[in-house]
Image: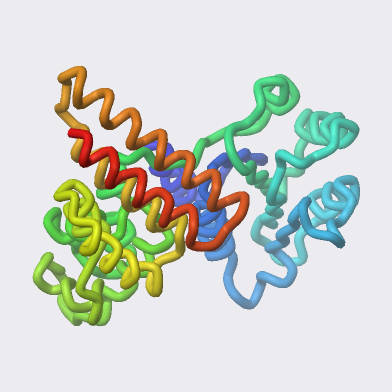
Amino acid sequence: MSYRAFLDELKKGLPSAAYLFASSDPFLHTEAVAAIKDLVPPEERDFSFHSFDLLSPDALAFEKILDVVNTMPFFSGRKFVVVENFQKLLKKDLKKLAQYLEKPSESSVLILLNAGAVKKDLKEDIRNLKSIPLDISAREIQAWMKGKARVKGVALTDSAAEYLLDTIGPDLGLLSSEIDKCRLIGKQTVEKEDIVEISEGKRTYNAFALVDAIRARDTDLAFRIYRVLRDTEEPYSLIGALNWQYAKSFAGKNTPEDKSYFLEVFSALNRADVDIKSSGGPYPVEFLLVKLLRLSRGR
């Protein structure tokens, strides 16, 4: 697990002089920054933890950031300097970074966070960085959930983790929020039955029920479920949950008819995801439901 490699480095206190962490999920960037910040005692953070964002309107020049990295820490421990959105670093600044990496500070740790995959043409310039991808694959999410629960002092059973994943989908931010709620249960080991009410509250429907209604060709029920979900879910999160449910349904389906059907389903899901990110609003989801219902009727 890529994220496991990050956690292993974290346990050792990030011993290398410079790191590059890459992820397409903003939540994992936020998690990484919070975990790095926790390495520094609260009373020392003003002096020993610094965070810069290259996308910020008032972003500090990279040369100035390197000055911060090279400045001796006020306290005896090492200083941690985080630079977010490394993918926006200018080419002229890459040379400065390469020069720094030839002889990095022994009293500071430089952490670069890259949104998305690192471009191939950058890898030669950053060869002296320890590079770790943070993204978590679909098959690793349950293990990540259980590990996160352990950090919170809770043991999450397989059935409980699977239930959360089935009802919420693979959105790591939402899953993390639900895991936080598990602490309110007051039990060291949390079972599926323990979290049904907490995870869903008064909500009657979830993405699993929506997929069932679509595949049953029940238009009225599908849109009734959607009207409930749109008040509690962001559109992109709902798309992710639907994608997760259909991916589970597709597993093991090998007939040409099945492959053709799911190809159209995932194409429709991808189109809706693109439309949501470009235009926002509920209409891409509603158009998606119409498309999925039509595909189900054709089977």
203 vs 27, nearest the viewer = 203
107 vs 221, nearest the viewer = 221
* Left or right: 150 in relation to 218: right
Displayed quadrant of residue 81:
bottom right
Whether residue 5 is visible here, answered yes or no, is: no
Q: Which residue is drawn at 29% across and 55% down?
A: 145
* Left or right: 24 in relation to 206: right
Whether residue 200 is visible here, answered yes or no, is: yes
Q: Which residue is drawn at 16% across and 26% down?
A: 253
* Left or right: 41 in relation to 108: left
Note whether 221 is above or below 117 in the view shown.
below
Q: In which quarter of the image is the N terminus?
A: top left
What colouring does the structure picture have?
A: rainbow
Where residue 220 sits: x, y (%)?
23, 63
Q: Residue at x 23, y 81 (%)?
A: 202
Q: Quadrant of the C terminus?
A: top left
* Left or right: 167 in relation to 277: left
Note whether 1 is above or below 207 in the view shown.
above
21 vs 137, nearest the viewer = 137
163 vs 113, nearest the viewer = 163
Where residue 39 sits: x, y (%)?
54, 61
Note whether 142 is above or below 49 in the view shown.
above
Where residue 167 sits: x, y (%)?
24, 60
| Total tally of numbered discs in the picture | 0
Q: Residue at x 69, y 57 (%)?
A: 79
Where residue 86 sits: x, y (%)?
71, 42
